[in-house]
Amino acid sequence: MSQFFMAILIIVFGGFLALLLARQAKLMKLIAVFSLSAGCLLGVIDAGTKLMGSDIYTASFSFLRVFSLGFQMDGLSAFFLFAIFLVSLLATLYSFHYMDHAQKPLRVAANYFFFSLLIAAMALVVCSSNIITFMFSWEIMSLSSFFLVIYNYESAENRRAGYLYFVFSHVGAMFIFVAFGIVYGLTGSFDFTAMGSLTETAKYLVFIFSFIGFGSKAGVFPFHVWLPHAHPAAPSHISAVMSGVMIKTGIYGIIRVYSLLDFNTPVFGYIVLVAGVISGVLGVVYALGQQDLKRMLAYSSVENIGVILIGLGIGMVGVSEGNPLMAVLGFAGCFFHILNHSLFKSLLFMGAGMVLHKTGTRSIDALGGLLKNMKITGATFIIGSLAISGLPPFNGFVSEFFIYFGAFKGIALGKTAFVMCIFAIVGLAVIGGLALACFTRVIGVVFQGEPRTSAAVDVNEKGATMLISMLILAGACLIIGVFPGALIYMPMKAVSALGLAYGNIPLEPFYQMTGNITQSAMILFAVVLGVIALRSFFYRGKTIGKSGTWGCGFTQPTAKMQYTGSSYAGSILEFFSAAAPLTVEHSPISGRFPLKTDYKSRINDIAELHMGTLIVRPVLFFFDKLRWIQHGDIHLYIGYILLAIILLLFFI
Amino acid sequence: MIESVILWFLAILIAPFFSAVILKVKAFFGGKKGPPLLINYYTLIKLFKKGSVYSNSTTLVFKLGPIISLATAVTVLMFLPIAGYTPIFSFNGDVIFIMYIMGLGRFFTIAAAMDTASPFEGMGAAREAYFPIICEAAMFMILIFFYRLTGELQLASFFTGGNTLGLWNMAGAPLLFIVIAFFIILLTENSRVPVDDPATHLELTMIHEVMVLDHSGPDFGLIELGSFCKLFFYATIISRLILPFDFGVPAFGFALFVLGLFIVYLAIGVTESVIARYRMDKVPQFVLTSFALAFFAIIISLEFIK
């Protein structure tokens, strides 16, 4: 594991150096970017080579003489490490030009410092082999990302987002503490492997508590409330890392706990699957209703976490039903989607970052026509959108194909599993359709048509490292979509590491599936080329005219008349209005010749809407009653301390 | 293999003819003579001979739209068993691929429409994005039904040789539901009345036709050909479903298949003539009917398979 620790050290060292060199802005950035990306590159290579073999690496250090910090890297860890380091590498590259205009070098340095901590902590989280190490890394991860979220702390909105994130990540951590506390209390061991020896009831409790805890990090509905606030607040390369890989550590936690509990009850699968379908559908519905580009992408992460959980749920149901093929297909689809989502979501966030960087606005309805001046950004964004909508020949299709296959295997099963699989399949179909609507809306309104406001006029796309990162990611989306067979061993290694007792999973049947995908992608390419040839044949020597868009008889169209993102989504949102109520603020029109009026509409997230009344208010009410404890009298405070010490003496 | 390729080619060639049958039926109901049955070929040839005018607002995506929409429609036909023959390509799971490849076509049709900055086309695009969501859910319901019967995810295992007849023998009654559900999906996906009216005079009320307002010349020809092929795809499936018989004599089988196609296109024509287009907010309910029908079919089939 020395190579892994080397990578971590280089990354953290780079972060510290950035702090030290904060005064020399140029040099600091150069060194930080160089060492962070060097560390990440080392990490990617290390994880990639470890995924080839199937050895388990362990290491442990004594900490404070009481605890031991244990690390373990198996196929599951290596798989997540690969995604974490890969996305962090490209995000670091991207940041070189993205952090260009930042006037405050100290803040940029702090950003790199916390960024390096975040990468290191994420890597350590997925390699921890005992509770102490895990929670230690987990907290570093939560705290460092908190500081990254409040990068632009001047804006009240960002501070609120940071606060919300802080509260959520700690309440979530509390649930994880409860789960791990049960483990420690019943077994007396900090080691992860102790979980297997729990009683059945305890296993149920541990799973449910950790599902809530990890689910809040992953952004599972209804614990996702922080996500659409925090992700847009951070700088775009951080959003890419947070949405691309950080939330996946929550998924990692769920999978790890599931695998350690080694308990084949169908209930776990059902919980995960239902949570997945709900997150998936509602996530994309809310994404469709967003007017902020980055917020919309954040909600789309909720959706993709849903898809990942559907795959995971299918796998779990397959295990409990004793159907190895269904189990492997479900898990493999889940892992594949984790990797794929980290690629296209970071690509999309980087594209959104470029838009924000050059236009200064995140409002979808203020933009338009960017594709003409931002060709690479636009093209890569379109590729990312195609991939995230699960369309062939891009990578999103591959993982959804696996999950569909697993779900269809479950159709032949008994009652509950059958119903669950129908639910999963229809859920996936609806998610796919909604995602298509959601992303055609963004492309159509942001990148196509005419600029709606002056912000979108005369933009450019400068920043070589930003463009390179996006091109690499877009290329990866296409290549994995066409040749998934080349990477199929990775998710399979992760599946083998789950300890399902299926022995060595043969890859041949899956190679056949991926081969079919490759073949059909090739057919599609051939046909497209054929049609292009046909088209150019028809256009030989023809006159091509240029003119304005046909306005159906209207001769003075303005850019303001274009269909807006809100109206595009309007009728679909109406269909889902029970889950996504719309608030409209509209000042009444008065007089015969009304001059000005305004119209505001907002989609409400029901989880956020009810969080206030169902959780926050009762908690506040309860603590309001306890206010008398905080009276400000120093004597009594000393009395409290004495009382606490005396009480504690009874327990020792 | 070679006959599959010939069939595929014939399908593309003949698809425009059948679409003209609908026009003839509508003309008959209107007491008119109607356009000749070869009208669509004349239109295509006319379009292919012309040049094009592009809007200043458009980008490369606008030109990609027609290419991808035709390419996807033609690719889909390669996986379709025509008249019970094995398709050119077929693999386990090709149905999912086909549905997503149609999604790809839709993505680019919508993107091309949004590229023009026209409010009308945006409106059409929004509807084109909306209704197929429900259609897709219904399609997957139908697929679950077929999977329940055959254990396969392959068009060839549903519609080649005696397979379709086998389905009827296994679960005839629920399959009737499926045929109706599939017909509703056909009407929706191909923008026919009562979901969309391709012949209306008002752009505001259209879906598919308004999205292609700015396309002209050969580009528009490609789109038209693509939509003929798409309709042919759905019609072929229904034709096979309603006349699944196989007599071992190729000529007879073909005659039966063509008869089935005529029935489907006649049914579309009759539907268009006797029903008015629904109000836009009623359309989802109509499409959901197909979902409900497929769902009932699955529930009923649970009894049959035991």
Image (tube, coloured by chain):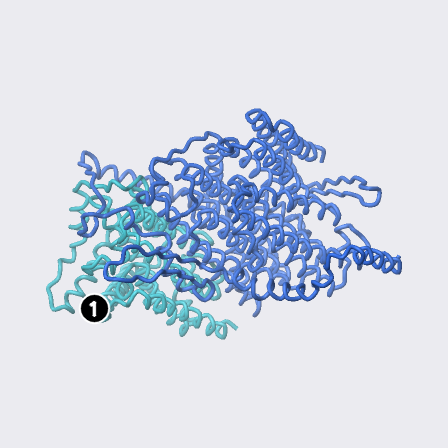
Asked which quadrant contains residue A123, the reply is: top right
Considering depth in this image, is B197 or A91 the residue closer to the camera?
Answer: A91
Q: Can residue A187 be seen in this view?
A: no
Horizontal and vertical percent for residue A89?
Answer: 57, 35
Horizontal and vertical percent for residue A314?
Answer: 57, 58
The colour assigned to chain B within the rendered structure: cyan
Horizontal and vertical percent for residue B156?
Answer: 41, 57
Instruction: Name the residue tied to disc 1.
Output: B273
The colour assigned to chain A within the rendered structure: blue
Please state, as top left, top right, bottom left or bottom right, where the N terminus of chain A lies in the image: top right
Horizontal and vertical percent for residue B12?
Answer: 27, 51
Asked whether, in this view, residue A1 is left or right of residue A324, the answer is right
Considering depth in this image, is A99 or A73 the residue closer to the camera?
Answer: A99
Asked whether, in this view, residue A259 is left or right of residue A449, the answer is right
Q: How crowded is mark 1: few (under 14 residues within 10 Å), some or many (20 or more)?
A: some
- Decide: is A538 above or below B43: above
Callout 1: SS: helix
